[in-house]
Structure formats: structure tokens, C-alpha cells
Amino acid sequence: MNIKSERLADTVNRAGQTDPFMVGGKVLSSRFLMGTGKFKNKAEVRDCIRASGTQVVTVALRRIDLTRHEDNILEYLPPDITLLTNTSGARNAAEAVRLARLAREAGYGTWVKIEVINDSKYLLPDNAETVKATEILAKEGFTVLPYILPDLNIARALVQAGAATVMPLGSLIGSNQGLRVKDLIQILIAEIDIPVVVDAGIGSPSQACEAMEMGADAVLVNTAVATAGNPAGLAQAFALAIQAGRQAYLSQPPGPRPFAKASSPLTEFLYNESTAS
Amino acid sequence: MKISINGKTHALTGPQPLSRVIQGLCKNNPYVIVELNGDIIHKDLWQSVQLCEGDRIELVSFVGGG
């Protein structure tokens, strides 16, 4: 089945009008945030942005490789995209704050994903340093989207600190394992008033759909799209799954039961009831 | 005169404007973000900032990331 990207854009726009997603004062019609790392080439990033309908992409800051010339990722991003600077590489709050300020001073906006990691095996975020960085940057007017291990106390502290969203991981970065901490994410969805964006470990559209169906406000996906056999195809599938999950959530699905409930009445069968088994 | 650029020591002939070092290493790359001794230096000021012995420059730009 080949779904035209124009129809997808229409659906996304309609969703934005009837079910808007607000972050930092901005109204987004897409609940699909996308990462730009690990792609085979930068042209694929551009194609996937188009296929996904995403309006927010993450980028990172690194030292320039002075030994060679390379195209810059920014050349492949549409002009109206919102840049979400990821503080990846930061090992503590001070380093995260420095990276955020660098991006802003250079004119690349004030949206920042705080990612503070000092464990290279599991890439688990340092929740405490993330709260510290959020406090500083939110006071300076940044729109802060902090990446965390789902923890209700930390999430409450982030709300107090002025975060625009909380971004709990689903499973380890790049692992494609889905919602391994689903119950902890569910707690955040139930108790936290700012948007909950599930970020990391979402490996398939069905997992993204699952996150949306349980009430997440959005998801952020990178590895699964970037490393797919057909990245643009999977980006489109993700977009559809995220919309399906959101619509399912809004339509209040009934949930599982422990016993059967017949679809048709258990009376007026076309045989005598006394001979029925 | 020795300065550090992206963590590596470079020898310069003498004091010179920051812009000359950036131009020499990055050509006309419009995406360079510059930090000098921990301070972010806006592009408008590159010409007027003079480098000194021991200065630490970071030349940074955006890359793909999650």
C-alpha cells in the first residue's frame, strides 16, 4: 500500500487543529519527534523528515573535524523545522548548560533536550544532574525537554524546575526494545501535568502506537528509523502508528477482561435450547 | 605563540585576530560556532578579538543526534 505523503500531511494538520500538542508555547500538529543521528547519509534525514511529518528534530553539537570538509546537517533540514539541541556528550549539569548556551548564542533557538550521561555501557541518564541543568536553563528562558529514567519524584522536580515536558526512556538508547519500563511511564502519564514524550528504545511503529495508546503525548524516535532497511518507509509507518495510537487513546478503548463476553445474545438460537450443549 | 584548538596545541606566528584562525581552518563554513576560553564569541566579534598565548578555542557545529 502506498500512502501519498500529501494525505499524511493533511491528516497531521487536521490533528493539529482538533488535538493540538503544545510545547513551550508552540502548537505542534505532529506528535512524532525525530532524531537525526546514525543515518547512512544526510539526504536520508531529509527524506525521513518529509515522510514522517515531524516538526521537531534533535541535533547534537560536536567539535568540527578540521581535517576534512563535510556537509552540515543543517543544510538538510527544512527551514521551518524546530531544532531541538541535544546536550549529548554532557557528563554533568554544567556541561549540558554550556552546550545549550552555545546553541542559543549561535542563533539556533532555545529548545534544548537535556541529556546528561556518564555511563557509556547503558547510556542511562543522570536524573539528578538533569534536574540541576533544567533549573538553570529554564530560568534563562530555554524550552527544556529533559531526558530521564522514568521516576515520579524526578519528574515532579522537573515540573517545579520549569521543564516544558518530561521525556522518559522506553528502553536503552538504540536498543529497539520498546517500552520495557511501561509501568513507570504510565505513572508519569497519570501524575504529571506537562507533556510526557517517550524517548529512546522505541524500535517499531507498534511500540510507538503502544506508547500513544497509553496516553503519552508524543514519542521521539531515532535509531529505528535511521537503521531501517527503508528509513523513509518506516518513518511514514511510525507517523501513521503514532496517529493511530493517539486516536485510540482519545477514543477510550475498553481494555482487557478476564472472562468472555459474547458478541451476540446467548438466546434465540436457531435450535432448541434443550438440545444445545 | 601556542594556543589550543579543539583540544590540540597549535603554534601561531604571533598574536592575530580570531577570524584569521577560523578562516584558515574552517574556510567559509557558515555553521561554525566558536567558544574562546569558555566564552561564546559571536560571529560579529571574530575580527575584533585578538588571540593571546594560551588561548583555548573550541570550533563546534551541529551534527546528527538523537
Image (cartoon, coloured by chain):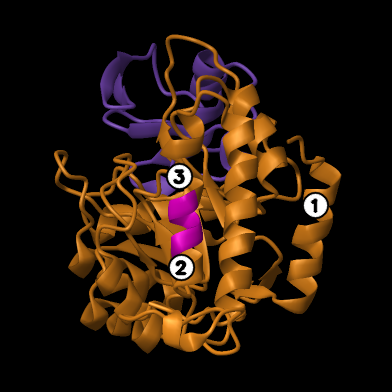
Q: How far from the left and from the top, in percent, is residue A136? A: 36, 72
Q: Which mark is residue A144?
A: 2
Q: In this rendering, do the residues under marks 2 and 3 share a single chain? A: yes
Of label 1 and label 2, which has the lower sequence position?
Answer: 1
Q: How far from the left and from the top, in percent, is residue A191? A: 36, 88
What residue would you read off at disc 1?
Answer: A9
* Mark pair 3, 1: CA separation: 21 Å
Disc 1 crowd rating (10 Å Cα; few below 14, some 14-19, many 20+) is some
Mark 3 belongs to chain: A
Query: Which span of residues is magenta-colored?
Result: A206-210
In this rendering, the label closer to the viewer, 3 or 1: 3
- Looking at the rendered structure, the number of numbered marks drawn on it comes to 3
Q: Colour of chain B?
A: purple
Determine if residue A12 is in view. Answer: yes
User: Residue A22 lies in what quarter of the image?
Assistant: bottom right
Q: Residue at x 58, y 71 (%)?
A: A248
Q: Could you tell me if the residues under marks 3 and 1 are in contact, i.e. CB atoms within 8 Å? A: no
* Mark pair 1, 2: CA separation: 27 Å
What residue would you read off at disc 3?
Answer: A204
Local SS, label 1: helix
Disc 2 crowd rating (10 Å Cα; few below 14, some 14-19, many 20+) is many
| Quadrant for the N terminus of chain A in the image | top right
